[in-house]
Amino acid sequence: MPTLQKCQLTYLNRWQKIKSVKFKTIKLKNTLKYLVISAFVFTQHAHASQQYSEGDSAFLKRGDQEGGGQDQARKALQLFREYHSKNPSDPESGWRHSMGCYFFGLHIAKDDDEKLQIFAEGRDAGKSALELAPKCAPCHFWTAINMALYGKHAGIFKMFFSISTIRHHLQETVNIDPGYAGAGAYRLLGLIEQKLPGILGGSNKRAKEYFEKAIRTVPDEPLNHLFLMKLLIEEMDDIEGAKAVAKKGLAVPPPPPDRIESIGSLKELEEFLKKPNL
């Protein structure tokens, strides 16, 4: 092959890789919000103190449209801030503060500046809790969530630079308490693998393994089935496999009303199975 032709072919191959990475990067950024929204299932910590019960109760009502869900979320964050301020040496106050920031920043904050401020607050609250309790699963989990959301709003390069740290916190969550937040850490690890370009370390095979681990760990969480279903549809063109996963997800016991993310996932599973020509 002539030298000029080789150079043109090399340039074309590199350009195709650049376009692929750019496309997948945009895809990762656009799906990160969904990743975090769907990652969360709130369950009160087994050793939660009664002194935090008012804030926990308000947070559990965050999805109550008729009962002023957003007002309850605001109240929860205000109380979590107060708990953390009054009990800075208690990691439970720190991770609650971080958790409250996640929801407020994602659903209530009005613009990118406010979101960045809230997610940074949540990230720092989680980190402060980790300094006190390095083996605290909720501390690692909510630190990772707020870091991911901060990166999304700070810019795509900031997000990529923080991916390894986010993965670390999620893996620590798994090591300590794999079932926390309905196996949420497994779901997030899987979706990072799914959406990250292959040349940057992503893998659909590993994503599938993470989602299957989530299902084995907490089989009654419909979000786990939803994430695997979406992977089979979007990346593996396995419609029959996706249908089987969706049916298993719909067979789980109905989640309680406060688990708004889980309820939403059941609707998605049902809508997929209702599609014609499947």
Image: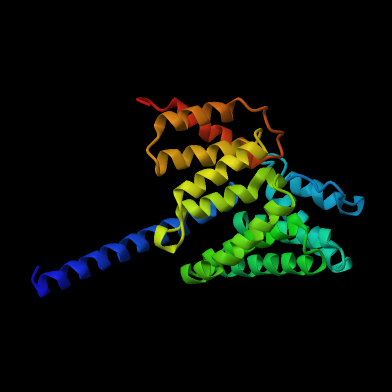
**Residue 225: x %, y % from top left:** 56, 36
Query: Where's residue 153, x and y in %?
Result: 53, 66
The N terminus sits in image quarter: bottom left
Residue 250 coordinates in the image, percent (x, y): 58, 27
Query: Can residue 253 be seen at all in this image of the molecule?
Result: yes
Which residue is situated farthest in the left direction here?
Answer: 2
Q: How is the image coloured?
A: rainbow
Instruction: Specify the quadrant of the image occupied by residue 170.
Output: bottom right
Q: Residue furthest front?
A: 1
Question: In which quadrant of the rendered view does residue 261 lie?
Answer: top right
Residue drawn where x is 64% and y is 70% of the image:
117
Residue 13 left/right relative to 33 = left
Expressed as whole percent of the image width and height from the top left, the position of residue 156 reads 47, 67
* Number of numbered markers: 0
Which residue occupies 56% across, 27% down? 248
Q: Quadrant of the C terminus?
A: top left
Q: Is residue 2 above or below residue 193?
A: below
Front-most of residues 41 and 258: 41
Residue at x 52%, y 30% (from the top left corner): 246
For this orientation, the residue located farthest to the right is: 50
Q: Is residue 34 visible?
A: no
- Tell whether 101 sits left or right of 25: right
* Residue located at (71% from left, 39% from top): 258
Depicted 260 relative to depicted 249: above or below: below
